[in-house]
Amino acid sequence: MKLRVWALSLLLVAPLSYASVDRGVLQFESIRSQQSEIRAAVKAANGRYKEMPQNTRGELLAKQDQLFHLMDGKQSTQDLNEDQKTEVFNTLEWIEAAINSADDERMVCERRPVLGSNRKERVCRTAGQIRAERESARERIESGEVRSSQ
């Protein structure tokens, strides 16, 4: 039981640790062991995964497969390029949101070019913020506030 509590707390802390990856390094060994424990529990439909819908379980296992593939042969985030780091972060956030049934709280990061520069920056927002911005833009277009400049 204590091991499960430790593993779940690690799951919640790993994405927070990853958010500062630009200055630090995230070791993959702890993520591998944590995800392996989660995977076993999801496959067995035990504990908190007992009520998880079958399609969510399948998607979670597929996301873990992607994550394991990205980490294959690597020891830490230093071994990844920036796009791969972002993908690892997004995948961990998706898994956490699926486990906690909190999709709107899931952080989604993307790399965007900086205007007037060749470099890219990482922009992170919650899925709820992205959805709210999209709905707000749609409402402004439908109400005529935003018009085409043709």
Image (cartoon, grey):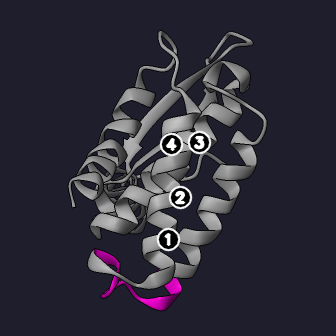
Q: Which residue is drawn at 57% across and 75% down?
A: 59
Nearer to us of marks 1 and 3 is: 1
Q: Which residue is drawn at 69% across and 40% down?
A: 71
Kindly tell me whether residue 42 is visible in this rendering.
Answer: yes
Q: Earlier in the sequence, mark 3 or mark 4?
A: 4
Q: How far apart are marks 4 and 1 (CA)?
A: 14 Å
- Report the disc number at residue 122: none
Residue position for label 4: 31
| Residue type at numbered disc 1 | Ala
Residue position for label 3: 88
Any magenta on residue 52?
yes
| Residue type at numbered disc 2 | Ser
Residue position for label 2: 36
User: The residue tagged with tag 4: helix, strand or loop?
Assistant: helix
Q: Is residue 135 left or right of residue 110?
A: left
Magenta range is 48-56
User: The residue tagged with tag 3: helix, strand or loop?
Assistant: helix
User: The residue tagged with tag 1: helix, strand or loop?
Assistant: helix
